[in-house]
Image (tube, helix red, strand yellow):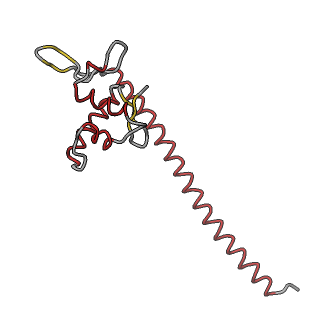
Amino acid sequence: MLDPELLERITARRMELDELEEELAKQLAEVRAERDELATAERVLERMTGQLAEERASAGPTPGQVGGRTVMLIPHREPGVEEDSLPWDYQRIITAVRQAAGPVMAREVGEVVGVDVSVKAKLEPLRSKLVRLVDRGWLRKLPDGRFTTRL
């Protein structure tokens, strides 16, 4: 004859395993759902990136008007376009970045070009100019937010 205490332990363990199986099945369903969501997000991101690239390629730089002439205030860096075609304050920024021992933060550039770096409202326009120089190909911005020359 079977021992009732052992049968009770086996039954209890089976119930524990059944509960664990249900919990794991629920977690597996959640993981699969999240993987599906990530796959969808990835497809959307790829599509949007492609659309943005097409828009950027089709939208050329917008020139400004100076003295009745159409000019690009901050031209893209291209062969034949020299730094002296940039406004003097942008030339000073590039010079400050170039003379630094390595990649620099906007605050360090501000100290060199004479911006009051203790006032955020005065530092942000400088940061904007640095980013504009990055967008036009004159400087490079590293993932940590520091700037360096492209050379």
Residue at (40%, 33%) from the top-left corner? 148
Q: Which quadrant does the N terminus fall into?
A: bottom right
Q: Which quadrant does the C terminus fall into?
A: top left
Residue at (36%, 22%) from the top-left corner? 57
Residue at (50%, 46%) from the top-left corner? 38
Q: Quadrant of residue 25?
A: bottom right
Residue at the limit of the structure toward the right, as seen here = 1
Q: Quadrant of residue 17?
A: bottom right
* Viewer-side residue, 96 vs 53: 96
Seen in the image, is 78 located left or right of residue 67?
Answer: right
* Viewer-side residue, 36 vs 77: 77
* Viewer-side residue, 4 vs 61: 61
Residue 52 placement (x, y as % from top left): 37, 30
Q: In the displayed structure, would residue 21 be above or below residue 62?
A: below
Q: In the displayed structure, would residue 31 be above or below residue 57?
A: below
Residue 31 placement (x, y as % from top left): 56, 54
Residue 32 placement (x, y as % from top left): 56, 51
